[in-house]
Image: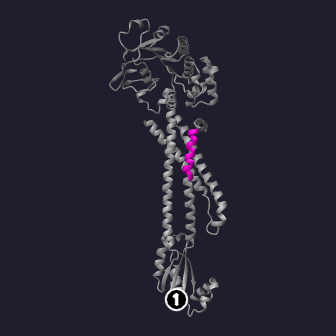
Amino acid sequence: MEFALYYTKRAVKDFLTNRFLNAVTTITIALSMLIVSTFAIFIVNINDIMDSWKRGVRVMVYLKEGVHEIQIPEIKRKIIQMPEVGEVKYISRQEALENMKKEMKRQASLFENLKYNPLPNIFVVRMIPSAQTWTKVEPLAADIEKIPNVAGVEYGQRWLGKMTGIVSIFNVSGIVMCCVFFMASVFIVANTIRLLFYSRREEFEIMRLVGATDSFIKTPFYIQSAIQGLIGGGLGILILFISFMLLMSSVENEMVSGFVQVRFLPVSISAAIVFLSVSAGLVGCYLSFKQFLNS
Amino acid sequence: MFHVHKRYGSHIALADINLDVEKNELLLINGASGAGKSTLLKLLYKGEAASEGQIIVGGMNLSRISSGKTPFLRRKFGIIFQDYKLIPGITVFENISLVLEVAGNKPSYIQKKVKSVLRMVGMEEKIGSLPPSLSGGEQQRVAVARAIAGGPDIILADEPTGSLDPNSADTIINLLTTLNSQGVTVIIATHDQSIINKTKGRVCYLEKGRIPRPRPVEFEKKPAITI
């Protein structure tokens, strides 16, 4: 504990001694992490939207014309036996028509001239939560379609599949972006530390002559890099949070409400970004030492 | 040192050196520039590794100690250089305390010890000064204070008076002989004949990397070296 305190004091002292170089590095890390966290907030909210859409996934099962009422329970039993199915609701053609009339009150005249009910009997199938993924909807629909007296199956949000693909691309790009900016931060820290090493080369030689171990020399630099990463990451998140609050206070009521609740990064992701930033500092320092000692 | 050789490529810096240094001894290594005096000292604190032969310091065979153990070997030494090797950006106090910090001493002990060694070399009032603000003689006294702060078994002084005026040089040599009389083994490498003549101690003469035999006439008055 005493040594940790000693090394931290030395690191803080070094940090303040070279404050301009360290400040530039910290701000650059902060900007990198701001970009990473902006992308993260975008991905988090896109995924939230996708999840809310996926939760609404339902399969409409249209029965063939002429299916007798007594055959309905058997069809329902076959559907509900499928493991992915959570809830099955039967809507008769009369009930469907009544619902339609209620929903389209203003266009009620359209139904007056209707000579027969064109709507089919249907089952509305909802899936269990764990099966509410796009990959499971398609096979389920195919299985239901094979049941006798089923005329067709529709899962109205076919476009959701395409959207899922697009969101996956976003997710992958997000990870790639994180990697790119992580590497950029590593590179920046490595360069700063290398500059500091070269400016203090003679000092290290003297330290070694008086019996300093490598860890005595290196530890303050690792702490210094971690401090740069911590402040940089924290600053990036803070800038994003302030920008987010300002933006939300001006647009929330007009655009966002009623659609989906846009939220800031969860604590776990914010912490992960700060951790990433600290790691970038430490890796940068490590690479710098390796290169410095090799030279 | 037993049959120690040091080569830099094809250049032979030291050849077949055999040397015993007793505890509490004052040894003067004399020779012209390029004779191998500094190299010999570097081999002792593992600033360089011997190309051949065995070096044993305080029971430790240097060819067998790992690089990780080198810092602990160096803590047995107090090293003084011609160019002082003080860190210019930190104070006299911080330069000296560094030796005690690397050894893991507590701040309260470091405070006391630094003041006490500075008092010994007569530099107590310069405790907060930066090295560049001091004269050459003062800087070398600080270097001596740093060398003795860790309580070393052996002091190695490589041309300690090389950059000093005669008065300052005398002060430094007096400090080193005083330390020797207090029980510290002192090895001084110097080309300065006046120091050799003034200082009581055994002399080892180096010529082109070798300890020649028979030794030059001017050293006959000095005690013989163990070879």
In the image, residue B175 lies at what x, y percent?
A: 55, 15
Q: Any magenta on residue A31?
A: yes
Q: Does the magenta-highlighted stretch encompass residue A91?
A: no
What's under tag 1, amino acid-wise? Answer: Gln
**Residue A191 visible in rendering:** yes
Residues rendered magenta in the picture? A20-34
A175 to A193, vertically: above or below = below
Q: For numbered disc 1, what is the local secondary structure?
A: helix
Quarter of the image with the N terminus of chain B is top left
- Report which quarter residue B109 is drawn in: top right
Secondary structure mostly seen in magenta is helix
Can see residue A226?
no
Which of the pair A78/A261 is nearer the observer?
A261
Residue drawn 50% across and 55% down? Answer: A177
Q: In x, y percent, where is residue A174?
A: 51, 58
> Which residue is nearer to you in this view: A231 or B147?
A231
Report in which chain the residue with disc 1 lies: A
Which residue has dot 1 on it?
A71
